[in-house]
Image: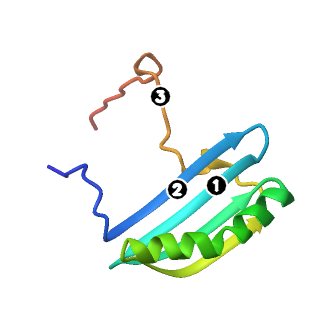
Amino acid sequence: SKSSVIDPDRATLKLKFNTDSLGDICVDLKVEDKKVWSTFRCEKLVTKQLVQESMVDLNSRMTALDYQLREFKSLHKHVDIQQFLVPKARLTDISRVSSEV
């Protein structure tokens, strides 16, 4: 059985935030052996700039937690999060077909 516990030293996370004032923000984080790579995709240009201005603070907070920020990107780009979600289906919409030859 596969464990559902997240390994803090080896993980890939995709987070999406939808706020009225900042718009959509999609965050990709990759963690390997206390090293972090991050990409922030922001719907609004002002949000991209705010995220970029927060990089120094984020880096110092990561360092305090003994993590090293290896890459930090802030992009003005909308991302459709639906492409990353697991497909959903209702059980009533599924049918089983079996045949023998």
Secondary structure of the residue carrying numbered label 2: strand
Q: Are marks 2 and 1 in contact (CB under 8 Å)?
A: yes
Q: Quadrant of residue 40?
A: bottom right
**Of the image marks 2 and 3, the number of the one nearer the N terminus:** 2
Give above or below for 3 relative to 95. below
Residue receiving disc 2: 14
Residue at image position (36%, 27%) is: 97
**Residue 91 image position (x, y, % from top left):** 40, 20
101 or 32: which is nearer to us?
A: 32
Q: CA distance from mark 2 to mark 1?
A: 7 Å
Q: Mark 2 belongs to which amino acid?
A: Lys
Residue at image position (84%, 58%) is: 46
**Residue 17 image position (x, y, % from top left):** 63, 45
Secondary structure of the residue carrying numbered label 1: strand
Q: Is residue 45 visible?
A: yes
The numbered dot on residue 89 is 3
Secondary structure of the residue carrying numbered label 3: loop
Q: CA distance from mark 3 to mark 1?
A: 25 Å
Give above or below for 54 relative to 43. below
Q: Mark 1 belongs to which amino acid?
A: Cys
Residue at image position (57%, 81%) is: 71
Residue receiving disc 1: 26
**Residue 51 image position (x, y, % from top left):** 70, 64
Residue at image position (68%, 41%) is: 18
